[in-house]
Amino acid sequence: MNIDIIPCLNDNYSYLIHDEQSNTVVIVDPSEFAPCDKIISKKYKKLNYILNTHHHHDHVGGNAELKKKYNAQIFGFESDDKRIPGIDKLLKDNQEFKVGKLNFITIFIPGHTIGHVAYYLKKEQVVFSGDTLFSMGCGRVFEGTYEQMLNSLKKLKNLPENTKVYCGHEYTHDNLKFCLKFNPNNNALKKKREIIEAKIKHGKPTLPSTIGDEIQMNIFLRYDDPDVKEALNLKKASDLEIFTKLRDLKDNF
Ligand code: ZN
Ligand code: FE
């Protein structure tokens, strides 16, 4: 399997997956037609499937034109059947589906929107997390509740640590600054900062991350870290209280 990272719009990423065994081509969250089509037409001249993590325009903007040009099938969560343009196949939570030789699992992770899913490749150890889990951050809670978002993040946190995380946006550097501010004694973060800044300087994506790195450094998965609780002055607060406080602070960061 090969994954190409396609930068789109200001800071979005679309992901182009090629299963060499079956010559199947899949795109996750095509933000816009032109940059996606450019690489598809050059490398593969075909597109079999479009997988959408959620209905926001910066994740489905290329759906209609790509479907028209390549006759691709569009997959998304069942409750977003009216919101994902051109949707063909409605997926349920925990649904396994085969695309070429790849076995995907849908993980329902509401919060950012109420129809948000992740796409998980267990054997290949890859997850596409959309706007729920970012590298060093998480998405804004637009439609769901804080509790839903926290539970969704906990689901992703439970994946094997080697799992590579491909998320919807290049927000890593700003996220890292926020993590450092409220988790100042996390030494792993300081080392990570140099790596991230070097990648950005060379115009490279900071992704993929891994679940293990996110557990170690992403403050939104560290609601039980005493250093975070201390920085927030909320030493006795619950996971949900800490998460809510962090999300509110990040909204205004
Ligand atoms: Zn979104
Ligand atoms: Fe987005």
Image (cartoon, rainbow, N blue to C red):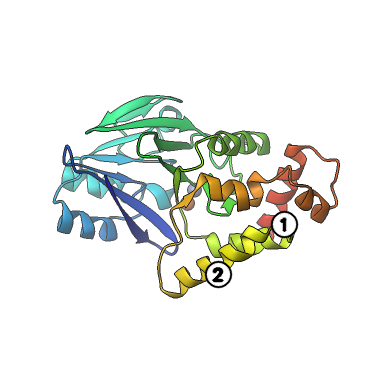
Circle 1 sits in a helix, a strand or a loop, which is it? loop
Q: Position of residue 39 (x, y in %)?
A: 22, 58
Where is 231 relative to 202, above or below? Answer: above
Where is 101 relative to 37, above or below? Answer: above
Question: Which labelled disc corresponds to residue 183?
Answer: 1
Amino acid type at mark 2: Glu
Which callout, 2 or 1, points at the residue further toward the start of the chain?
1
Apparent side of residue 203 relative to residue 114 in the rendered image (left or right): left
Q: Note whether residue 236 is visible.
A: yes
Depth check: give the residue in front, 214 or 83: 214
Residue at image x 35%, y 32%? Answer: 104
Q: Residue furthest bottom?
A: 201
Task: Look at the image and tell me in which quarter the C terminus lies.
Answer: bottom right
Q: Position of residue 67 (x, y in %)?
A: 23, 43
Count numbered badges in the picture. Answer: 2
Q: Which residue is mark 2?
A: 194
Question: Which labelled disc corresponds to residue 3?
Answer: none
The local crowd at label 2, few if under 14, some if 14 to 19, many if 20 or more residues have their Cα within 10 Å, is few
In this view, the mark in front (2 or 1): 2
Task: Look at the image and tell me in which quarter the N terminus lies.
Answer: top left
Cα–Cα span, label 2 and label 1: 17 Å
Depth check: give the residue in front, 59 or 120: 120
Q: Position of residue 236 (x, y in %)?
A: 86, 41
Residue at image x 66%, y 51%? Answer: 219
Apparent side of residue 24 relative to residue 245 in the rendered image (left or right): left
Q: Position of residue 185 (x, y in %)?
A: 74, 59
Where is 201 relative to 176, above or below? Answer: below
Amino acid type at mark 1: Asn
Circle 2 sits in a helix, a strand or a loop, which is it? helix
Apparent side of residue 133 relative to residue 23 in the rendered image (left or right): right
Residue at image x 40%, y 71%? Answer: 203
Name the quadrant containing residue 90: top left
